[in-house]
Amino acid sequence: MEVKARSCFSNACFLLLCILLSNLITLSLFSSDSPFGQNASSLTTSLSRAEDEIARLRSELRAAISTSEKLLRELGAFASHLHDAAIIPSRLAVPDDSPDLPKEYLEFVSAQKLPFGHNTNFGSDHILPPVGRACDRLTDDLARYMNYTVGGPCPDDEILAQKLLLKGCEPLPRRRCLSPGRLPSRFVEPAPFPDSLWSIPDDSSVVWTAYACKNYTCLVSRKHQKGFDDCKDCFDLAGREKNRWVGPPAADGNSLDYSIDEVLAYKKGTIRIGLDIGGGTGTFAVRMRERNVTIVTTSMNFNAPFNGFIASRGVVPLYISISQRLPFFDGTLDLVHSMHVLSNWIPPKLMQFVFFDIYRVLRPGGIFWLDHFFCVEDQMHDLYVPMIEGVGFKKVRWTVGRKMDRGAEMKEMYISALLEKPMTSG
């Protein structure tokens, strides 16, 4: 044990001596008097100066970047202004050399200078009121439509306005007149909600000059009249309209008539807002509102005041044609429904655009309810089924049946389907 202790003590002493010698050598080498020390001091000074120079260059670089970004913004605004001037020179001011276009129309469509100059959201210092592409070509109809006294009553020209719209002048240009041009001698308020949902409004709510019927009694009974009218029986709220979309599901599951409750049950309460394309008198929207779902209904006024009637029931009408891009942001609607309107009377290329537009406005998991789409049998297999499948919907339900109201020899077919927008891109 004693020998071992001495050995440990000797080792410790040797280690301590080594540490002391190494410290002495270091002090000697790097003292200011030694050549090594002088070199180290010079290197430290050089490094310090280099760091200061780098910091200065960084500061100048940041300033240069900021100046460049500002110049790029100004150049972008100037380029945008030049682009606007090049693309729309005739709309930057009311032109004097357009004798075929009404002055009031040119007042509306001319580019208006923004009060606060260039706006990054617009990418311009002007705002351009939108009108349909075909408006400029429909000079005679447009001249009649824009012929009024500013601030006075609007002309009674609903038929002309709808004719312009259907010819492609959509949206119509705004006007500076008061509509309707002539108020009724009396006006009866609509029924309060929820009674309004199934009430026929008072005749005073409509200017009837554009229609064959001059009151709602005539519209309700016109299903018994000869001749064709769009949605001929849908003003009779106590008739077939009362039972649409609310019947029990078919026992075999092969009925073309789906019920609203079936569709809502499939999505388990996540259908809240949607659109009905060509929704007649708004009964689909009414049935949905009874279930706390908000539906906007598009409709035209083909020989009847469809839009006014829809509004009187307490649901929202939207006066646009089938050609118009749906006025909703991408991926916002839970449901799009259409019954009869989307069918083979629409040109195939336009129909394809419509299907893709419906896909656009639906959110992931949203439902396109195609309700009684009709076409002839050959078209169904060769054209429309591939067209629908090519959009990318998932088939939740798909039912095909014969359309027999015009006879079996017509070989017409119905398709009813629930089509779901995929939840993922995969």
Image: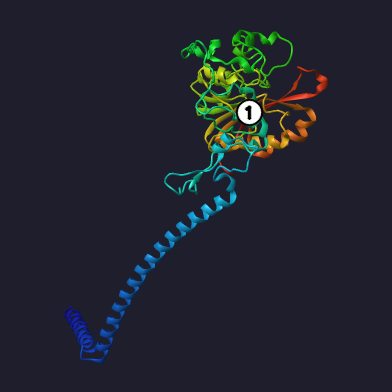
Residue bearing mark 1: 144
Residue 346 in which image quadrant? top right
Give me the residue at 61% from left, 7% from top.
Answer: 217
Of residues 230 and 390, the one drawn nearer to the viewer in this rendering: 230
Q: Quadrant of the C terminus?
A: top right
From where the camera sits, is residue 112 visible?
yes
Give me the residue at 44% from left, 48% from top.
Answer: 117
x, y percent for residue 215: 60, 10
Of residues 378 and 104, the one drawn nearer to the viewer in this rendering: 104
Q: Residues within 10 Å of mark 1 (few under 14, many from 20)?
A: some
Q: Quadrant of the N terminus?
A: bottom left
x, y percent for residue 374: 72, 26
x, y percent for residue 366: 56, 33
Q: Residue furthest right?
A: 409
Total labels: the figure holds: 1
From where the camera sits, is residue 397 visible?
no
By what rule are the colours in the image chosen? rainbow
Residue 301 in which image quadrant? top right
Q: Is residue 355 above or below residue 206?
A: below
Of residues 89 and 323, the one drawn nearer to the viewer in this rendering: 89
Of residues 289 and 181, the one drawn nearer to the viewer in this rendering: 181
**SS state under label 1:** helix
Q: Is residue 206 left or right of residue 411?
A: left
x, y percent for residue 144: 63, 28
Name the kind of residue labelled 1 in the image.
Answer: Arg
Residue 345 in which image quadrant? top right
Q: Is residue 39 above or below residue 73?
A: below
Q: Is residue 290 above or below residue 362?
A: above
